Image: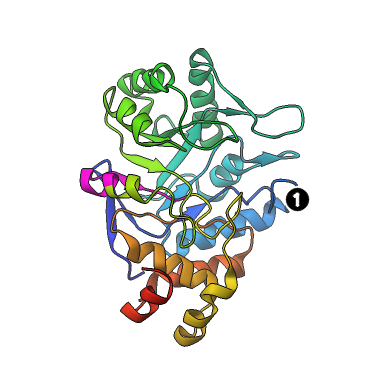
């Protein structure tokens, strides 16, 4: 891989193009369960291709297929240098949607669930995912983040992160304990967190976009990337990932997929260098 590296928390260097495990259990929020054997193959191939940063969560599961179980089965004992990040906070409702948030007293059990599922004694990076299915802002995160800070002090967590937050919530967390990473929605056509990205870059905090290829409430208009993709002999997904890597040295991209072919396509984006002309056409 030719992309540069970033030290999460100052001591966990990873390539800036990693892998997101959300789509291993199913391709969409309402899609059918995926073949776990394919998920195992995707994970092993990701590591073969140089992915050393895997982003997961215990709630990435569907009909008995769980991302954490697949990661453990495919990769444990984990190779040296592999960083596994997870997140806690959302709770599933009776429909399987992440519409509720854990109380502070529920977070320890969620962290322990990740430890067990991944077969680890300590988690490299744990995000407090805020807001359930809503956007960032509008609530205090101090009580919940303080619980994770206590678990970090106990040695169950190495580094802490926050996800789906605004600047005030990030400041609230940083007043309690060091924040190593922020995970917010962000992609080539969804730049609502641009100011927060700048703040993270200045502070040495990793910025890890979720939905880096679109999804959720902000899909990418593929036609707007088609000209650059044709000129660079690349796919629009590769252009979107290359744009992220060019946007800031603090960005760590974690595209997810349940397909080996799509994985290989995504990982090849690490070698795609966009020109000034390309970046101007994409809006900077």
User: Residue at left 38%, top 25%?
Assistant: 156
The quadrant of the picture occupied by the C terminus is: bottom left
Q: Quarter-wise, where is residue 127 in the image? A: top left
How many tags in the picture?
1
Which SS class for mark 1?
A: loop
Residue toward you, 89 or 19: 89
Residue toward you, 119 or 29: 29
User: Residue at left 46%, top 49%?
Assistant: 54
User: Residue at left 35%, top 18%?
Assistant: 150
User: Residue at left 27%, top 31%?
Assistant: 178
Q: Horizontally, is 265 left or right of 39 in the view?
A: left
Image vertical order of residue 131 relative to residue 282, above or below: above
Q: Position of residue 49 (x, y in %)?
A: 45, 66
Image vertical order of residue 124 relative to residue 256, above or below: above
Q: Horizontally, is 177 left or right of 22 in the view?
A: left
Range covered by the magenta-colored residues: 199-209
Can residue 159 be spotted in the picture?
no
Residue corresponding to mark 1: 31
Residue toward you, 4 or 76: 4
- Mark 1 neighbour density, 10 Å: few (under 14) some (14–19) many (20 or more): few
Can residue 188 be spotted in the picture?
yes
């Amino acid at each position: 891989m030719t992309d540069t590296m970033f030290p999460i928390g100052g001591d966990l260097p990873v390539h800036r193009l990693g892998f997101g495990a959300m789509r291993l259990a199913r391709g969409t929020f309402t899609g059918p369960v995926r073949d776990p054997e394919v998920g195992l193959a995707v994970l092993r191939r990701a590591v073969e291709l140089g992915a050393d940063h895997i982003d997961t969560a215990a709630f990435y599961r569907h009909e008995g297929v769980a991302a954490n179980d697949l990661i453990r089965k495919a990769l444990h004992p984990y190779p040296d240098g592999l960083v596994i990040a997870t997140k806690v906070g959302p709770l599933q409702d009776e429909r399987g949607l992440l519409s509720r948030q854990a109380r502070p007293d529920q977070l320890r059990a969620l962290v322990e669930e990740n430890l067990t599922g991944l077969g680890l004694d300590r988690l490299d990076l744990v995000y407090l995912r805020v807001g359930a299915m809503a956007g960032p802002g509008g609530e205090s995160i101090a009580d919940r983040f303080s619980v994770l800070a206590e678990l970090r002090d106990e040695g169950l967590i190495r580094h802490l992160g926050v996800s789906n937050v605004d600047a005030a919530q990030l400041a609230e967390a940083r007043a309690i304990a060091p924040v190593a990473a922020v995970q917010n929605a962000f992609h080539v056509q969804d730049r609502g967190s641009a100011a927060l990205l700048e703040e993270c870059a200045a502070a040495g905090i990793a910025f890890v976009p979720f939905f880096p290829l679109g999804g959720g409430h902000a899909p990418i208009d593929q036609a707007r990337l088609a000209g650059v993709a044709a000129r660079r002999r690349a796919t629009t997904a590769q252009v979107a990932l290359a744009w992220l890597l060019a946007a800031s040295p603090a960005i760590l991209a974690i595209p997810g997929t349940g397909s080996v072919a799509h994985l290989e396509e995504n990982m090849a984006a690490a070698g795609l260098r966009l020109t000034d002309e390309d970046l101007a056409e994409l809006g900077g």
